Image (spheres, rainbow, N blue to C red):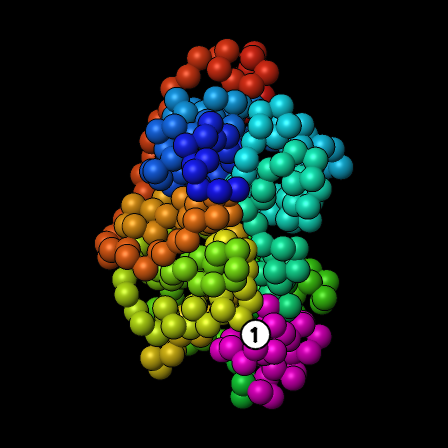
């Protein structure tokens, strides 16, 4: 698509109106150069979701099945066809697999581009053991990682406890434990051995998450680091800074994996070295924060993947942020499906 069509009637779909990730993507989109003219459609699996009501640029509110439902992709394609959707942003962790796997079909049947990495990269970013194997292959720093039954192998490498126990596939910081003994290891086992990873303990309280954005040629267009405090799996407050070690390591990760669009790398600083321990191959719940400081990955995705424009995200600023509760107001007939029974959520 050529750049002289950039002022066309742009229709964008954002899923996950009820999630912090979806709402952050929406805010970044509204902050972009497209924000005053774009027609936004949003989806959710429930009738209520704050993302339905945060802007008058939202022209379509749609209820869709949950992502694991076999009819989910059909529903997304129908919305795209009926509303001439040009691009789709996933606003929940649960939807990235379904949308990435169906991206080719969605494009063929509706013309819409899914702003997610190809399935093998999404899979790699979701599965911590596969992440470890990939980082080892590319000679990237990463804590030693084994599946649960190989715990003695890890102890031989690290010299003993403590170690970390984590779900092999998870989100929102659930079931993550610092393990100090074999007795504690088995007492806190929360799933089958194949679904638990054990990691070398990174002895540091300094934790970063950094986002890199890659264009559709696989080039790294920019990296922005953030120190943050998590509450309920969400960044509650934090600071954008210019740690060169974090930037360099994140750039190496993105250059090796070549994701489509955004990749977020979580790492700790140990003896001055940035050591990644997890990646998320998707947009995040802090897209709006990064956009405020000049790193708008949502705008970059539209620029590059829809309009073939070059993107440069290296001119961001440092700063801090914190989150707070905010209300949205609407009429009952604004809710998808019309009537809403408040007793269903009380």
Residue 126 image point, x, y percent? 60, 58
Point 58% across, 42% down: residue: 113
Point 36% across, 44% down: residue: 288
Residue in front for this viewpoint, 187 or 170: 170
Please say if 318 is above or below 330. Answer: below
Residue 157 seen in the figure: yes
**Residue range corresponding to the magenta coloring:** 131-157
Residue in front for this viewpoint, 194 or 76: 76
Please say if 134 is above or below 158. Answer: above
Quadrant in the picture for residue 123: bottom right
Count of numbered tags: 1
| Residue 143 highlighted magenta (yes or no) | yes
Q: Residues within 10 Å of mark 1 (few under 14, many from 20)?
A: some
Dominant secondary structure of the residues highlighted in magenta in the image: helix
Kindly identify which residue carries mark 1: 135
In-image side of 183 versus 220 (left or right): right
Please say if 185 is above or below 54. Answer: below
Please say if 90 is above or below 174. Answer: above
Point 60% across, 47% down: residue: 96
Residue 3 image point, x, y percent? 44, 42
Residue in front for this viewpoint, 135 or 205: 135
Residue 264 seen in the figure: no
Point 48% across, 15% down: residue: 334
């Amino acid at each position: 698509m050529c750049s002289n069509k950039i002022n066309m009637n742009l229709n964008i779909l954002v899923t996950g109106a009820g999630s912090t990730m979806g709402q952050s993507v929406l805010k970044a989109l509204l902050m972009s150069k497209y924000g005053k003219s774009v027609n936004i459609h949003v989806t959710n699996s429930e009738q209520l979701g704050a993302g339905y009501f945060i802007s008058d640029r939202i022209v379509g509110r749609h209820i869709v099945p949950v992502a694991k439902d076999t009819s989910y992709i059909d529903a997304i394609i129908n919305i795209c066809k009926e509303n001439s959707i040009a691009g789709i942003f996933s606003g929940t962790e649960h939807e990235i697999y379904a949308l990435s796997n169906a991206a080719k079909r969605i494009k063929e049947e509706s013309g819409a581009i899914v702003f997610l990495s190809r399935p093998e990269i999404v899979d790699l970013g979701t599965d911590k053991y596969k992440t470890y194997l990939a980082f080892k292959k590319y000679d990237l720093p990463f804590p030693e990682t084994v599946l649960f039954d190989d715990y003695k192998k890890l102890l031989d490498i690290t010299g003993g406890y403590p170690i970390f126990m984590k779900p092999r596939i998870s989100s929102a910081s659930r079931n993550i434990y610092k393990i100090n003994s074999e007795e504690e290891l088995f007492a806190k086992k929360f799933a089958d051995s194949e679904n638990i990873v054990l990691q070398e303990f990174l002895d540091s309280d300094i934790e970063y998450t950094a986002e890199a954005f890659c264009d559709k040629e696989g080039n790294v267009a920019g990296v922005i680091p953030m120190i943050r405090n998590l509450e309920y799996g969400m960044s509650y407050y934090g600071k954008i800074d210019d740690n060169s070690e974090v930037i360099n390591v994140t750039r190496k990760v993105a250059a090796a994996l070549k994701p489509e669009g955004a990749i977020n790398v979580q790492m700790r600083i140990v003896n001055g070295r940035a050591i990644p321990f997890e990646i998320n191959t998707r947009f995040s719940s802090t897209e709006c924060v990064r956009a405020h400081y000049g790193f708008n990955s949502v705008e970059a995705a539209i620029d590059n993947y829809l309009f073939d424009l070059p993107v440069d995200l290296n001119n961001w600023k440092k700063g801090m942020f914190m989150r707070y509760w905010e209300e949205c107001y609407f009429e009952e007939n604004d809710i998808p499906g019309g009537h809403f029974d408040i007793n269903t959520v009380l």
